[in-house]
């Protein structure tokens, strides 16, 4: 029974604090006060700007980002551009541009010897000291930088304001502010258009006139700032360690019936207007062309974009924008039965969240994805696209040991495949640049590799600290292949195949035999976690054969076997991979019953570390599952119970995914509730702290995993038993039952139907609801509806024509074939 109370939709009296006049739309974030504007604080440290980043509301078109705080006497729009980085270098030679130490490979054997000999600790001959000395990067990574700001001040007295409302409609991507002063009504709208590539702002007044001053500022070196009656132009230079980046922000102002006056400081005053429209365009000279990364005619692009926007006019731009965003937003929607609280978003959060917030958080994550990842040469970074600081936390970079990959887990299942394109473009640069790192750091002649930190300038080198050495090409390749798994688009697969193959080729050469004869990755670590080895008394991070590496290698090799089969090329390469798979270091269960994080039984059951990378084959991988590898899944469950429930935002998101893959809806929901209610700021940005967007996206991925899973394949169509039907990637070693040996698939895996597991981890608290437009691997779109915890209806639409099997409550269907564009409906009407 759906329990939506219509009366509740129109509650609310202006006098009840925290409530608004109408809670009419479930995708609207709403507030009754402006955000905190601390952007102009003297210090440029992150700590001085936290209020704004936690309360202002985000807009974006994938390349341009903007936030508005809704300030009464001063509106402050933070403007970002996804490629603007500072303090890095560009235009170097290939090796230097990749950040790599030339000739480092000559010392690789020395470093590896320290690993083999177990030189723990921090002494001069330790693994840590030697890898730092010999293999680390020699070039600066830099950091993602703010672009410019737009300041709009008015003569309004905040004390005189009544009925203040601030909102963001995540379905249409339009922000609004409205208030009254006396009998006069003031309204503002804000959006960031993808079709027109501008930020648009409109102020209107009824019963009074507007007097505004409009200014543009930047924290970078200004080389031009001037204004005319309709225009403010800012040109500036963002400092690099080599070759500063020039950029322009051009602002068009239409004062309509008011009087515009350019001021000598480059700002513009508008007096006595009933409406004022502002369009903002911004570009830098960055181009995603390795290794120069330069050449865009930013001034010409600004002019052209602004002229086109002005020619169309505000109303046409707004119509096109809302159609554009709502088309994406309407492709997938989560609707959970609940009583709308009528609370503002910040008060809903303060009241502990609940189902209303859980629904909003998922749908809002889709909005954030639309804003920060679309048609740009660079993917979303640690803060998506929004950053106010010259020295942001963790450089606001691309961390490849979870964060950037997590940003993209939801795009396919939550039906935003177009948002994946920036990741693909970035990976192409990495694959090119990473060849130099592979050769110079590791002496590997084929393929590419990548360390733990990335930027938009092809940085692929190892982290400056030897404690943080890792390879990430296998994890990046996983995201790339998953995108194919969902779409089955062979043209896309052919496009990324060289990147996948290059990642595998690197590891084929880089893998080295350990003392037991198995092939392992080293030097490496298990992301950010440390172990204590007996008498050495110091936590160590450097490792060999860490479980996550070995699991990802199996994943990569299987994906490459499938890709080369589908594309019908490289049979020899396929056979090489098949030959290597059984030699990879096995997965192991340890003395506490846990899945071992390292090949030796070093795990500490009291360890609460936020990274749980050795469960990567459970999620986002597919090779550990309670349905195919029961013992490993049992061991993963033990690990999860050791690690506990309190985490950072992204870790809570990942734990949601893990519990969902373990088919425990109550635990998955507990973690998701913690994320949404305890790890969100008033603007629902995830807090790590500080703000880090991966938690928003990881949480949304967790919701998808609770409702639909499609990572298992049916290789035995005639078996109704999923344990016999599904491909199994690890087999227990008969000689040593705590070891699990990787298994190579044959070519038939590429044709095996995916198994669509419906409601695999439905939270008991979500008694009724529906989700429309989830995507499943194999090229399907799925709508699900449930009541009292039971599936009541499922529709599975085939995007390309294809076959699948349904798994629901322990029962596996036959193989079901559906023509392109046709749907399979469950239960079948008779
Ligand atoms: C990894 C994580 C941290 C943080 C940082 C950006 O280092 O361990 O928690 O998310 O990335």
Image: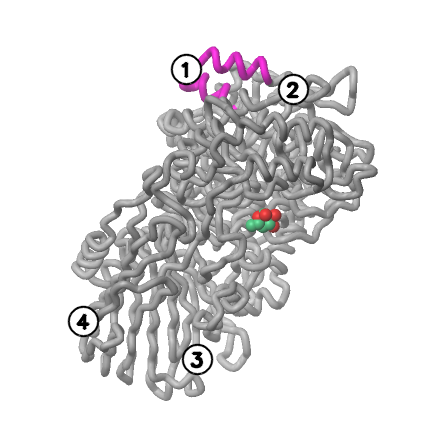
Residue corresponding to mark 2: 513
Task: Say if disc 4 is inside 8 Å of ligand 1.
Answer: no
Q: Which residue is mark 3?
A: 163
The percent coordinates of residue 282 (x first, y second) are 29, 57
Tell me which segment is drawn in magenta. 559-580
Distance from the alpha carbon under mark 1 to that under mark 2: 31 Å
Q: Is mark 2 within 8 Å of ligand 1?
A: no
Q: Which tag, 3 or 4, sits closer to the chain's start?
A: 3
Residue 745 image position (x, y, % from top left): 57, 17
Q: Nearer the viewer, mark 2 or mark 3?
A: 2
Disc 1 designates what residue? Answer: 568
Q: Nearer the viewer, mark 3 or mark 4?
A: 4
Q: Residue at x 62, y 33 (%)?
A: 524
Mark positioned earlier in the residue sequence (3 or 1): 3
Q: Sort mark 3 into few (<14), some (14-19) or many (20+) by Cα contacts within 10 Å.
A: some
Q: Is residue 789 above or below residue 583?
A: below
Cα distance between the residues tagged 2 and 4: 69 Å
Q: Which residue is mark 4?
A: 228
Q: Residues within 10 Å of mark 4 (few under 14, many from 20)?
A: some
Q: Is 830 positioned to the left or the right of 122 in the image? A: left
Q: Residue at x 35, y 51 (%)?
A: 63
Q: Say what secondary structure mark 2 lies in.
A: strand
- Whichever of callouts 1 and 2 sits on the residue coming sooner in the sequence is 2
Asked if marks 4 and 1 touch (Cβ < 8 Å), the reply is: no
Quarter of the figure with residue 125: top right
Closer to the eye: label 4 or 1: 4
Marks 3 and 4 in Cβ contact (< 8 Å): no
């Amino acid at each position: 029974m759906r329990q939506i109370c219509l009366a509740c939709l129109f509650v609310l009296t202006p006098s009840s604090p925290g409530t608004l006049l109408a809670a009419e739309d479930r995708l609207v974030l709403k507030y009754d006060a402006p955000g905190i504007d601390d952007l102009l604080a003297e210090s440029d440290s992150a700590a001085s700007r936290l209020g704004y980043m936690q309360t202002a509301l985000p807009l974006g078109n994938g390349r341009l980002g903007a936030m508005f705080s809704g300030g009464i006497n001063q509106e402050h729009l933070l403007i970002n551009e996804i490629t603007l980085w500072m303090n890095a270098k560009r235009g170097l030679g290939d090796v230097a541009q990749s950040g790599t130490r030339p000739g480092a490979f000559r010392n690789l054997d020395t470093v590896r010897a320290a690993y083999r000999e177990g030189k723990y600790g921090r002494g001069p001959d330790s693994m840590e000291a030697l890898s730092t000395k010999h293999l680390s990067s020699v070039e600066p990574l830099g950091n993602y930088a703010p672009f410019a700001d737009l300041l709009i001040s008015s003569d309004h007295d905040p004390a005189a304001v009544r009925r203040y409302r601030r909102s963001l409609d995540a379905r249409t991507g339009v922000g609004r502010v409205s208030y009254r002063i006396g009998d006069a009504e003031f309204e503002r709208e804000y959006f960031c258009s993808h079709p027109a590539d501008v930020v648009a702002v409109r102020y209107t007044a009824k019963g009074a006139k507007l007097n505004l001053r409009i200014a543009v500022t930047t924290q970078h070196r200004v080389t031009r700032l001037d204004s005319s009656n309709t225009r403010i132009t800012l040109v500036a230079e963002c400092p690099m360690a080599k070759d500063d980046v020039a950029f322009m922000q051009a602002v068009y102002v239409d004062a309509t019936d008011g009087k515009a006056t350019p001021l000598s400081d480059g700002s513009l005053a508008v007096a006595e207007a009933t409406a004022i429209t502002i369009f903002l365009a911004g570009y830098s000279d960055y181009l995603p062309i390795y290794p120069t990364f330069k050449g865009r005619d930013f001034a010409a692009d600004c002019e052209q974009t602004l002229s086109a926007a002005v020619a169309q006019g505000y109303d046409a731009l707004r119509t096109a924008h809302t159609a554009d965003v709502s088309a994406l937003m309407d492709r997938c929607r989560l609707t959970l039965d609940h009583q709308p609280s009528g609370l503002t978003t910040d008060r809903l959060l303060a009241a502990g969240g609940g189902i209303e917030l859980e629904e909003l958080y998922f749908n809002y994550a889709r909005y954030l994805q639309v804003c920060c990842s679309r048609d740009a040469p660079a993917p979303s970074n640690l803060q998506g696209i929004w950053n106010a600081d010259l020295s942001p936390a963790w450089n606001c970079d691309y961390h490849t040991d979870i964060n950037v990959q997590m940003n993209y887990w939801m795009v396919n299942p939550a039906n935003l495949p177009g948002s994946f394109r920036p990741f693909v473009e970035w990976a192409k640069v990495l694959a090119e640049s990473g060849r130099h790192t592979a050769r110079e750091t590791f002496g590997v002649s084929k393929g590419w590799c990548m360390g733990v930190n990335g930027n938009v300038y092809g940085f692929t080198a190892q982290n400056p600290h030897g404690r943080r050495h890792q390879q990430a090409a296998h994890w990046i390749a996983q995201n790339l292949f998953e995108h194919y798994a969902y779409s089955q688009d062979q043209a896309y697969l052919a496009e990324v195949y060289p990147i996948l193959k290059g990642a595998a080729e690197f590891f084929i050469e880089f893998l080295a035999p350990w003392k037991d004869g198995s092939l392992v990755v080293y030097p490496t670590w298990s992301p950010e976690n440390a172990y204590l080895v007996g008498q050495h008394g110091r936590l160590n991070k450097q490792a060999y054969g860490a479980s996550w590496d070995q699991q990802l290698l199996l994943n990569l090799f299987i994906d490459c076997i499938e890709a080369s089969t589908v594309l019908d090329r490289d049979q020899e390469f396929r056979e090489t991979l098949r030959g290597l798979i059984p030699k990879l270091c096995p997965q192991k269960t340890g003395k506490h019953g846990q899945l071992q994080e390292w090949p030796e039984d070093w795990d500490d059951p009291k360890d609460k570390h936020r990274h749980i990378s050795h469960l990567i084959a459970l999620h986002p991988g597919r090779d550990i599952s309670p349905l195919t590898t029961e013992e490993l899944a049992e061991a993963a469950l033990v690990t999860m119970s050791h690690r506990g429930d309190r985490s950072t935002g992204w870790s809570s998101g990942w734990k949601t995914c893990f519990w969902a893959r373990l088919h425990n809806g109550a635990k998955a929901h507990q973690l998701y509730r913690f994320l949404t209610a305890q790890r969100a700021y008033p603007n629902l940005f995830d807090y790590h702290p500080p703000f880090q967007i991966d938690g928003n996206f990881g949480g949304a991925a967790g919701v998808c995993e609770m409702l639909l899973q499609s990572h298992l394949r049916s290789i035995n169509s005639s078996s109704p038993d999923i344990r016999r039907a599904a491909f199994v990637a690890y087999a227990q070693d008969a000689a040593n039952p705590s070891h699990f040996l990787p298994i190579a698939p044959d070519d038939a895996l590429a044709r095996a139907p995916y198994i669509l597991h419906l409601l695999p981890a439905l939270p008991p608290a979500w008694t009724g609801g529906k989700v429309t437009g989830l995507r499943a691997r194999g090229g399907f779109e799925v709508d699900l509806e449930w009541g009292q915890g039971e599936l009541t209806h499922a529709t599975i639409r085939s995007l390309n024509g294809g076959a699948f099997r349904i798994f629901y409550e322990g029962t596996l269907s036959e193989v079901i074939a559906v023509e392109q564009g046709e749907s399979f409906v469950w239960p079948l009407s008779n």
